[in-house]
Image: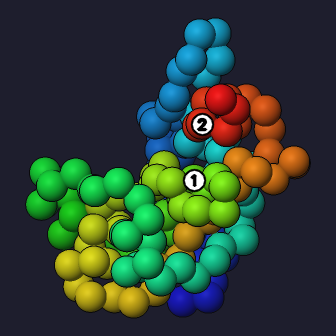
Amino acid sequence: MKLLMENWRSYLSEDWRTETDWEKGEEKITLGDVDNYLGNETDNINVSELSQQIPSLPTRGAERVSAASLDYPIIVVKRGGKYRYVLDGNHRLQKAINQKIEIIKAKILDLDNPETPEAFKEMFGGTE
């Protein structure tokens, strides 16, 4: 299991890196860009606490929720010391909620961190 968690990217098609993206003006950021920045470090987050801090999850997509793999970490945006929303992994988080799983692995995009790229802060809500 440890090997899977350390090398999870190699088990996926590389299309996921570019299929999900966000654009604002001339700026385009892909999920792969965010993942590259965050690296392999993950945190264990309490599912119940996280679900209380973020907006309600979409209620559609029961098939995607049941098919979601909890082997891969979610990506959560944090600002002002609080989790704001799930950038990637809503279906995985919903599956964890449904299955009453207490802890989920997550990568944290902390918009308050001075090392976070300005483009990420602007795209994902770090500058007002």
- Decide: few, some or many residues near mark 2? Use Cα within 10 Å; few <14, some 14-19, many ≥20: some
- Residue at image point 13% right, 60% down: 63
Query: Looking at the image, how many numbered discs can be counted on the residues?
Result: 2
**Residue 27 on image: x %, y %:** 65, 17
**Contact flag, marks 2 and 1 (Cβ < 8 Å):** yes
Q: CA distance from mark 2 to mark 1?
A: 9 Å
- Indicate the amino acid at tag 2: Gly
Q: Is residue 103 visible?
A: yes
> In the rendered image, which residue does mark 1 sit on?
77
Picture quarter with the C terminus: top right
Q: Amino acid at mark 1?
A: Val
Q: Nearer the viewer, residue 25 or 73?
A: 25
Residue receiving disc 2: 125
**In the image, residue 99 lies at what x, y percent?**
23, 85
Residue 128 sits above or below residue 45 on the image: above
Secondary structure of residue under mark 1: strand
Task: Report crowding for label 1: few under 14, some 14 to 19, many 20 or more residues within 10 A (C-alpha).
Answer: many
- Quarter assignment of residue 107: bottom right
Element under label 2? loop
Residue for point 61% across, 56% down: 78
**Where's residue 47, x and y in %?**
41, 79
Q: Residue at x 28, y 56 (%)?
A: 56
The image shows residue 90, relative to residue 23, as above or below, that is: below
Q: Residue at x 72, y 71 (%)?
A: 41
Q: Position of residue 32 (x, y in %)?
A: 61, 43
Can residue 10 be seen at all in this image of the molecule? no
Instruction: Give whichever of discs 2 and 1 has the lower sequence position.
Output: 1
Please say which color scheme the image uses: rainbow
